[in-house]
Image: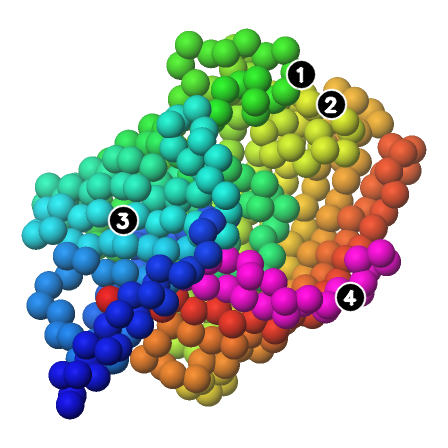
Amino acid sequence: MKNMKRWLLAPILVCCMNTIPASAQGGQNIPPGDDSHIESIAQRVLKIQKKSDAFNLFLNLHCSYQQRFDGDDKGGAFKGRQIRLEMRGDLGIHWSYWFRYRLNRSGERQDDNFTNNIDYMQVDYCFNDRWRLTAGKKQLNLGGFEFDYNPIQIHEYSEFVGALEEFHLAVQVAHTIAKGHELQLEVFNTNNNSIDKVYPGAGLERSQLPLGLNLNWAGNLLRGRLQTLWAYSFMNEAKGANTHLLMLGQKLNMKKWQVSVDYNGAWEDADRHGIITAETGAVARNVTYHSVVGEANWQPAAHWNLFAKGALEKASVRGDEHLRNYRTSYSYQAGIQWYPDLTQDAKLSLAYVGKGVRYKEGCGLQDYNSNRIELSLICRMKLY
């Protein structure tokens, strides 16, 4: 009878996996840590015993009910915000792979011959415990803790991070210089599409080498209590147009509370972020963006987490007095989260999310605010 139940449940599980609708920002720079303690659905339902770590299958999900309070956008609705299918595993002591595919986005083929719903298609080779080589499509290691989160964990990104195009074809060399400290050097395609698609109407000429270079330090100090994710990136966008990014993340990591502060800065000959371009109607040149993002988490009891997050951001056009430091945005979030089962990576989150944008007088733009409350189911479900 038990065997019959297993055979009946097996096709049901497979059907459920195959009926997920087709479509992170973001992802984590390094695959999540040891999740061997998490029992998969296949283990729990079918009693299948895994004998290797060569194949792991995850479903990343963020669904919510949102109630908005802003002018014409008032009202409530259910939203399927993030659905991503993820496969990863270790093939012996040297090789590993990572694949992640966004299901709730229609795939558009890009000039790099990948579709934009592929987050990761990377292969890693570990030479030894100090050197690692990674190649394929991956998230760039741009620094900062907000950027490093799995996107399903985010209620709303800061404007700076939310506007970044983070998944590119790249080659990365990582070197552990000391215990808990790793340097990563990365060479990558600057753009996934041609310069005319990225900057339409700007009249920019394609560079002979539209590549970027990124240097990242992932640090672990004071026995893990202080962590860093610092990175500097140089991107050759087009002839005569480059981008410089500086993203410095630091995190105080205690037993029941954690606080992180990120500084993000961008100096762009052509408006790669696109925030200023969207407001002025033409591709902006010689722009700067500055952002400070802070987040605090506190776990008063085993199944509960309280969080607060805020960001202060500024945008400016150098050489244009009307648009110099013309835009300041504030965003703020707070919420409570409940983990019903500590053996699974799943939680219910009730959060308030607000934002305000203020413009300098004389620039011709009007201030605005947005506010919402949302109840979310957030889980990284281990299917196998």
Q: Main secondary structure of the magenta part?
A: strand
Q: CA distance from mark 1 to mark 2?
A: 8 Å
Q: Residues within 10 Å of mark 2 (few under 14, many from 20)?
A: some
Q: Earlier in the sequence, mark 2 or mark 3?
A: 3
Between discs 1 and 2, the one toward the N terminus: 1
Tag shown at residue 282: 2
Query: Mark 2 is on which residue type?
Result: Ala
The mark that comes first in sequence, 2 or 4, is 4
Please indicate whether residue 99 sits to the left or right of residue 198 in the image: left
- Between the residue at mark 3 and the residue at mark 4, the CA separation in whole angstroms equals 39 Å
Mark 4 and mark 1 lie on one chain; the one further toward the N terminus is 4
Q: Which mark is residue 98?
A: 3
How crowded pointer 1 is (Cα within 10 Å; few <14, some 14-19, many 20+) is rated as: few
Q: Secondary structure at mark 1?
A: loop
- In this view, the residue farthest toward the bottom is 1
Residue at 18%, 48% in the rendered image: 96
Residue highlighted by disc 4: 75
Q: Nearer the viewer, mark 3 or mark 4?
A: 4
- Mark 3 element type: strand
Instruction: Identify whether 151 is placed above or below 241.
Output: below
Q: Is residue 319 left or right of residue 203?
A: right
Q: On residue 133, which mark appears?
A: none
Where does the C terminus fall, quadrant-wise? bottom left
Neighbour class for label 3 at 10 Å: few (<14), some, many (≥20)?
many
Tell me the magenta residue range.
60-83
Q: Amino acid at mark 4?
A: Gly
Sequence-wise first label, 3 or 4:
4
Are dots 1 and 2 in contact, CB under 8 Å? yes
